[in-house]
Image (cartoon, rainbow, N blue to C red):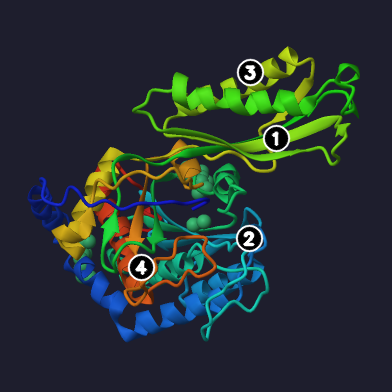
């Protein structure tokens, strides 16, 4: 996730989920082999291997679109499991296939990139690369998806359709997901699931919700040009500092006066750069920041109004302004909006596997953002939090902290959920595919 502050408020445990327990049982009992994915994921054969992969990746973190060794490690593990894949997709991305090779296609996604953070945790598998760290848990995401692949491959003959494994580069700010979508590699996929580790959530628990769960996120940068001169003779200058100051103030009215108070939004000016002397009015000032909203409509409204305010305030103060939303270098992320039908499927699978009081199905949304939303622009998608809380810790470390330490005992749950979500989706949807031509049709 790109920037985080997640809060988990368990308010709605009781509710109506008993209904779903029975539905879940009926879906999964269609094939008993899907029931013991969690046992498989916890077995030493899968668990020890998964943890060693996670630690290997943790020791060698790579930034977005530079995940060359991570990608190579993934491919060598897929080779060992005899899982075919496409590579390269979006530079370092790898897309694997398990099942019949025929529809329906369901995707599982793991992001692979690390952050430019110096790890401060002293442990045996500390990052060996100065200034880089898997501080968002994407090392664990890769390991869990590989473990899910191992489990699914073991049951490949039962899979009625195709599971598409998406190992994606560059989630942290560079929109690797958008590049994967644009590659066309997922064009026949009808649903996608993704998860994210949650250091505040106990092991064996999950949290999610139907509808918006993470905000859409955009960036802006503006250069406000005036006319520099002597600070004691303002009449000969056009002061860009005063103009930019008014912009910062005016931008505050977007959320406080224009937005629906029940529709959470953020506009933060986080950069303000200009001037270098006590007695000189500078030629120009640059400002920049982020804006967040939970609907496309609110997001687009903010974007349009930020531009109007900056351009308009520049004119009021006789300055010129140019504004850049960095669409090419760092594309804004749309809001992450969970599909309602997939939410029901998720609750069924998770309650069946973990028990009713380990599943928070109405988590408070976060103003953080995820590029998983690019998949959701082109197909129904579902994203959830997975508990990896380290019970020994007194202080809870958040994502992107140099002190983040995850509890690896949470990983089998993620692997098993991946495997179960994909296989139950395929079981549920195979009847809906009319007249599928089997691969061996012509040979019989
Ligand atoms: C369930 O698994 C068994 C044994 O692996 C297999 O023969 C059967 O075809 C599967 N049934 C379904 C509905 O996938
Ligand atoms: C999607 O399905 C169509 C029709 O079967 C096929 O021609 C195409 O190659 C498929 N695309 C991918 C990326 O597999
Ligand atoms: Zn992340
Ligand atoms: Zn992150």
Pointers 3 and 1 in contact (C-beta within 8 Å): no
Residue visible at 12% across and 58% down? Answer: 25
Mark 3–mark 4 distance (CA, rounded to whole Å): 44 Å
Mark 4–mark 2 distance (CA, rounded to whole Å): 27 Å
The residue closer to the viewer here, 247 or 345, is: 247
**Residue 199, image x, y percentages:** 38, 64
Farthest residue in the front direction? 232
Q: In this rendering, which labeled residue sits more in front, label 3 or label 1?
A: 1
Mark 3–mark 2 distance (CA, rounded to whole Å): 39 Å
Pointers 4 and 1 in contact (C-beta within 8 Å): no
**Within the image, what quadrant is residue 170 found in?**
bottom right
Residue marked by disc 3: 308
Q: In this rendering, which labeled residue sits more in front, label 3 or label 2?
A: 3
Q: In this rendering, which labeled residue sits more in front, label 4 or label 1?
A: 1
Classify mark 2 as within 8 Å of ligand 3 or not, answering yes or no: no
Seen in the picture, residue 72 relative to 99 is either above or below; the reply is below
Mark 3–mark 1 distance (CA, rounded to whole Å): 15 Å
- Disc number at residue 287? 1
Residue visible at 50% across and 29% down? Answer: 299
- Disc number at residue 388? 4
Q: Earlier in the sequence, mark 1 or mark 2?
A: 2
**Label 1 residue SS:** strand
Pointers 1 and 2 in contact (C-beta within 8 Å): no
The residue closer to the viewer here, 130 or 96, is: 130
Pointers 3 and 4 in contact (C-beta within 8 Å): no
**Within the image, what quadrant is residue 270 found in?**
top right
Residue marked by disc 2: 92
């Amino acid at each position: 996730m790109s920037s985080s502050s997640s809060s988990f408020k368990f308010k709605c445990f009781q509710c109506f989920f008993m209904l779903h327990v029975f539905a879940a049982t009926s879906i999964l009992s269609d094939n008993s082999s899907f029931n013991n994915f969690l046992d498989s994921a916890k077995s030493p054969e899968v668990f020890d291997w998964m943890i060693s992969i996670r630690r290997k990746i943790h020791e060698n973190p790579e930034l977005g679109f530079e995940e060359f060794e991570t990608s190579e490690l993934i491919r060598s593990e897929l080779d060992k499991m005899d899982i075919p894949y496409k590579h390269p997709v979006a530079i370092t991305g790898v897309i694997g296939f398990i099942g019949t090779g025929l529809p329906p296609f369901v995707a599982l996604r793991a992001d692979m990139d690390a952050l430019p953070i110096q790890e401060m945790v002293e442990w045996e598998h500390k990052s060996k690369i100065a200034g880089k760290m898997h501080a968002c848990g994407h090392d664990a995401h890769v390991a869990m998806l590989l473990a899910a692949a191992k489990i699914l491959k073991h049951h490949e003959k039962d899979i009625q359709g195709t599971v598409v494994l998406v190992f994606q580069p560059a989630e942290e700010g560079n929109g690797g997901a958008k590049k994967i979508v644009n590659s066309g590699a997922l064009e026949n996929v009808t649903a996608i699931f993704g998860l994210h580790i949650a250091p505040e959530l106990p092991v064996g628990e999950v949290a999610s919700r139907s509808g918006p769960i993470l905000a859409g996120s955009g960036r802006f940068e503006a250069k406000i040009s005036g006319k520099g001169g002597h600070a004691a003779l303002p009449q000969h200058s056009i002061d860009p500092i005063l103009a930019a100051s008014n912009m910062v103030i005016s931008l505050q009215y977007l959320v406080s006066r224009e937005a629906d108070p029940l529709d959470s939004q953020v506009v933060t000016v986080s950069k303000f750069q200009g001037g270098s002397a006590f007695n000189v009015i500078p030629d120009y000032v640059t400002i920049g920041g982020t804006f967040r909203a939970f609907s496309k409509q609110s997001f687009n409204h903010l974007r349009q109004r930020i531009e109007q305010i900056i351009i308009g305030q520049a004119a009021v103060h006789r300055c010129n302004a140019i504004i850049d939303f960095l669409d090419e270098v760092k594309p804004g992320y749309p809001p992450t909006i969970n599909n309602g039908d997939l939410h029901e499927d998720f609750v069924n699978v998770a309650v069946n596997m973990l028990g009713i009081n380990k599943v928070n199905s109405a988590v408070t949304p976060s103003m953080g953002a995820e590029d998983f939303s690019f998949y959701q622009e082109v197909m129904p998608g579902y994203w959830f939090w997975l508990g990896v809380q380290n019970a020994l810790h007194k202080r809870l470390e958040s994502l992107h902290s140099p002190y983040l330490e995850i509890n690896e005992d949470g990983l089998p749950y993620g692997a098993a959920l991946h495997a179960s979500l994909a296989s139950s989706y395929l079981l549920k949807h195979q009847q809906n595919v009319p007249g599928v031509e089997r691969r061996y049709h012509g040979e019989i």
